[in-house]
Image: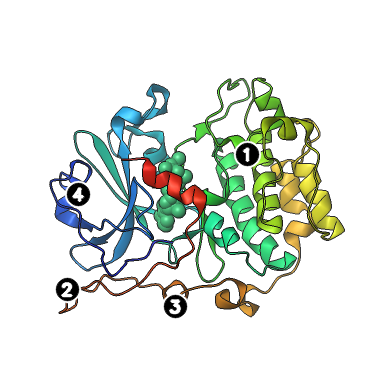
């Protein structure tokens, strides 16, 4: 989770990635949760202290085909930046500001809730019933449906790329693998996460995109419900045999095995997911308390919106819980 820890210190303004006019407007904090995410950091707006999340995108790391001319900004930007500043949906993270210096784009985003992602949520073994899981899931489906209606593929749908607030409102983030689809456009490279890659793409087939996205959505749903990955290696994915650790409703079993159908021709489509009885089941999200569903620290139930400089010179104290995940640590090793 993204919490301002007691020791949160401002990034020195001469640090390469904060340099430029961005640093006149925002103060970047070194800490983000346990300080694990190399390129994504908490920051606050200098004028009013509003806490935001900044993603530093190193220009040299953006592939040639991932640059676009953005007519609103009037310049070439990474597709991730162009898409996130253009898309508007309640379940897609909002970009507030974009800056750049010689080497980096600085993409300033809203902080959603405490910044907990679905990986961390799942890692805490939440006490989820199917209705609540369906509530989280349908928001991701709705974001994808909006994107696909604009012919945009996310291509990296997974728990880490979904953030959740204390009202169980989910938002899709990380458009670094997104692309446009077209009837005659086939992709031959996979740029998402291996554990979420579909069997036909692992086998080296060219793909249009929507079927791969549905598979990744299936892996995400399976992980949310069962707290573990459906497949642990390429052979298991290609075999596509599901061995759920416990029994769930018939509707849910049906939806998961349809999304994880090894044959892309028979795999559930987005409009079928949207209409599926498990997705549309009745749920009253207001009947659930976040703190009854997962272990939390108080700041995750009432996350600070503003950065307070106190007389003690400490930030408003928000200790990160001792729950960081193994996957999270990998990000820490990846420098900006
Ligand atoms: P990468 O492309 O390196 O995976 P992401 O955009 O997915 O970068 O960000 C890495 C992590 O940072 C996410 O998994 C999430 O935990 C956190 N994160 C990113 N953006 C936000 C945001 N706007 N609000 C809260 N947390 C975020
Ligand atoms: Mg990511
Ligand atoms: Mg990414």
For the N terminus, the image quarter is bottom left
Nearer the observer, disc 2 or disc 1?
A: 2
Mark 3 vs mark 1: which is more N-terminal?
1
Element marked by disc 1: helix
Residue under label 1: 196
10 Å crowding of disc 2: few (<14), some (14-19), many (20+): few
Mark 2 vs mark 3: which is more N-terminal?
3
Element marked by disc 3: helix
Residue under label 2: 313
Mark 4 vs mark 3: which is more N-terminal?
4
In this orientation, which residue lies closer to the viewer: 36 or 47? Answer: 36
Q: Compared to 289, does 163 lie above or below?
A: above
For the C terminus, the image quarter is top left
The image quarter in which residue 232 lies: top right
In this orientation, which residue lies closer to the viewer: 120 or 63? Answer: 120
Q: How far, Cα to Cα, is label 2 from label 1?
A: 44 Å
10 Å crowding of disc 1: few (<14), some (14-19), many (20+): many
Residue 295, can we see it? yes
Nearer the observer, disc 1 or disc 4?
A: 1
Nearer the observer, disc 4 or disc 3?
A: 3
Residue drawn at x 23%, y 61% as measured from the top left: 45
Residue under label 4: 22
Mark 2 vs mark 1: which is more N-terminal?
1
Q: Compared to 61, does 89 lie above or below?
A: below
Mark 2 vs mark 4: which is more N-terminal?
4
Residue 92: numbered disc: none
In this orientation, which residue lies closer to the viewer: 240 or 141? Answer: 240
- Quarter holding ligand 3: top left
Element marked by disc 2: loop
- 205 vs 16, left or right, is right
Residue drawn at x 57%, y 67% as measured from the top left: 168
């Amino acid at each position: 989770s993204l919490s301002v820890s007691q020791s949160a210190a401002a990034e020195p303004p001469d640090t390469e990635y904060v340099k430029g006019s961005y640093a006149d407007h925002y103060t970047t904090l070194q800490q983000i949760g346990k300080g694990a995410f190399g390129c994504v950091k908490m920051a606050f707006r200098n004028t009013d202290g509003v806490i935001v999340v900044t993603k530093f995108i190193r220009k040299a790391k953006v592939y040639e085909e991932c640059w676009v001319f953005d007519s609103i900004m009037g310049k070439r930007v990474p597709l991730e930046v162009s898409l996130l500043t253009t898309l508007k949906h309640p379940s897609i993270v909002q970009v507030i500001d974009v800056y750049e210096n010689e080497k980096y784009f600085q993409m300033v985003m809203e902080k959603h809730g405490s910044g907990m992602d679905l990986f961390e949520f799942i890692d805490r073994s939440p006490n989820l019933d199917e209705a609540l899981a369906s509530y989280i899931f349908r928001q991701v489906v709705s974001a994808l449906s909006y994107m696909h209606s604009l012919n945009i593929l996310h291509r990296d749908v997974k728990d880490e790329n979904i953030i959740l607030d204390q009202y169980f409102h989910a938002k899709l983030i990380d458009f670094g693998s997104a692309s446009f689809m077209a009837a005659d456009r086939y992709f031959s490279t996979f740029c998402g996460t291996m554990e979420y890659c579909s069997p036909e793409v692992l086998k080296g087939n060219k793909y249009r995109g929507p079927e791969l996205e549905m598979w990744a959505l299936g892996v995400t749903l399976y992980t949310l419900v069962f707290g573990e990955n459906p497949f642990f290696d390429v052979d298991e994915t290609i075999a596509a045999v599901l061995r759920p650790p416990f029994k769930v409703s018939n509707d849910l079993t049906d939806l998961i095995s349809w999304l994880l159908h090894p044959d892309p021709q028979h795999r559930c489509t987005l409009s079928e997911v949207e209409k599926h009885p498990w997705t549309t089941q009745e749920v009253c999200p207001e009947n659930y308390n976040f703190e009854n569903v997962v272990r939390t620290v108080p700041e995750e139930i009432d996350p600070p919106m503003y950065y307070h400089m106190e007389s003690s010179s400490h930030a408003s104290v928000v200790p990160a819980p001792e729950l960081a995940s193994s996957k999270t640590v990998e990000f820490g090793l990846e420098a900006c």
